[in-house]
Amino acid sequence: MIGYLDIVGMFPNIPVKKTLEVVNEGLLNDETLGLRMDWKPEDISKLLEISVETFFKTLDGKIYFQRDGLPIGKSISKPMAGIYMHWFEKNYVFNEGSRFKDNIVFWKRQMDDIFFVWRGKKEDLEFFVWILNGVDNKVQFTLEMEKDNYLPFLDVGIMKVEGKLVTKVYRKPTHTQQYINWDSNHPKNMLLGVLKGLIHRAHVLCDKKEDLLEELALLKDVFLSNGYPEKLVLKTLEDSWPKETLKAVLKGVEQKVKVEKPKENYFEVLHAPYVKGFSEGLQRRLQRLQVGFVPKGGETIYSNVCRLKQRVDVEERKNVVYAVPCGDCGIRYFGETGQHFSDRKSQHQRDVKAGKTTNGFFCHVKENAGHKIDWESAVFVDYEKNWKRRKIKEAIYINAINPTKAIIKKGILNLEKGYDLDAIWSEFNGVLRNSIAKKVGRAV
């Protein structure tokens, strides 16, 4: 009989302490570790422990710490969960002393989903799963078995036919058949890629020709209903036959792959929001200049209206370009930071207190007796995660207030202009000054 097991809430229920012990044991037994790196097993284990345990979440202004289990969404969680489950299977599924070892004909795990072929009674299988659930009260398995010789597993429908397993595409009954509409604001090659990907899946998963033809007919109707041009859909389906047949024939055959050398004169890529009907022509023109074009998401109604993330206090914001004024004369300092703003503000305040002549705030209060920096009126004029782009934005705002090559102290608190900009950016100074004025609430 065939069936599958699902690990209930795998990541939060993986025991971290035991996983670290398994990792450390594996590192100690790895004779090639010293040849591949200088790190010791205990160093790697300690770094893993720090990485997993230093995971916090903020909700309603409160900071929560995850006491056990692997954090969902953290890059290290997936390999660590795999390591633990490999140890679990080795000791409790395939161990030499297991009375059910001969019952397991086939066992394949994809993260938290396990497909298996079982030889024996249903009662023995249920007893085996009961034993697995008794190993750790957090690591629990749910069992699903075939019904009428059919089992849905992930996106594959598996049937038992005359002692063989036959597969085809499976969709949940609640599937809406909704895909990205052809008239949506997305590049056409990406939309076409959705269709091609599903066609490829059909060729790979459908063992019987009648199942494949049925699936392709369904895809044709589905994509026509999603606005795709009929000629394009029919041509893509027709072209898929020789391509997919060739892939099937060459599967498992060793081939010599010709690796293209990177273009020597290719030097830059433009990342810009996609504009339907314009970006395609821009991409062709940029190719002549040997410049790549990568579309990125722009502003949407959703991004402007919905605010689903927890609101962060002003002091706790980071990756910002900020402006801080003098409370007496109103002249501003423009800076950038990847830290929390409260930490950067504290650094500035320490520099002022220490009398650092490289700090623009200190130089201003020293030269203007009685002036005080108004930290409470700090505003964020821009946001940028990338360090280099944030530096460029900082320089653009400084240049908008101080367009001359030298710093004019009566107009800005900064002591230097920052990142070296092309003169073309000065054309936007008026627009940027208006933008700054709106954010600070006064003319700049």
Image: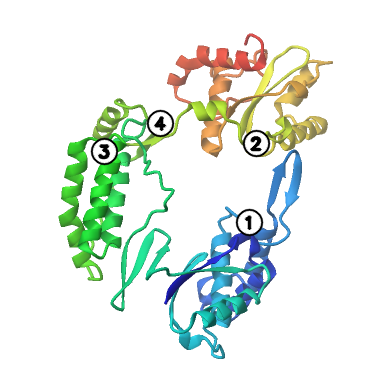
1 or 3: mark nearer the eye: 3
For label 4, the residue is: 272
Q: Are marks 3 and 2 in contact (CB under 8 Å)?
A: no
**Pointer 1 or 3: first along the chain:** 1
Amino acid on which disc 1 is placed: Pro
Task: Judge whether 27 appears above or below 317 on screen.
Answer: below
Amino acid on which disc 3 is placed: Leu
3 or 2: mark nearer the eye: 3
Q: Residues within 10 Å of mark 2 (few under 14, many from 20)?
A: many
What's the distance in space between the residues labelled 3 and 2, CA to CA? 46 Å
| Quadrant of the snapshot with the C terminus | top right
For label 3, the residue is: 224
Q: Is residue 343 left or right of residue 241?
A: right
- The residue most toward the top is 443
Q: Residues within 10 Å of mark 4 (few under 14, many from 20)?
A: few
For label 1, the residue is: 71
What's the distance in space between the residues labelled 1 and 2, CA to CA? 23 Å
For label 2, the residue is: 318
Q: Secondary structure at mark 3?
A: helix
1 or 2: mark nearer the eye: 1
Task: Judge whether 287 appears above or below 364 on screen.
Answer: below
Q: Secondary structure at mark 2?
A: loop
Task: Judge whether 147 appears above or below 89 on screen.
Answer: above
**Pointer 3 or 4: first along the chain:** 3
Q: Are marks 1 and 2 in contact (CB under 8 Å)?
A: no
Determine the image quadrant of residue 71.
bottom right
Closest to the observer, 49 or 85: 85
**Pointer 4 or 2: first along the chain:** 4
Q: Is residue 31 visible?
A: no
Residue 352's disc is none
Q: Are marks 1 and 3 in contact (CB under 8 Å)?
A: no
Amino acid on which disc 4 is placed: Ala
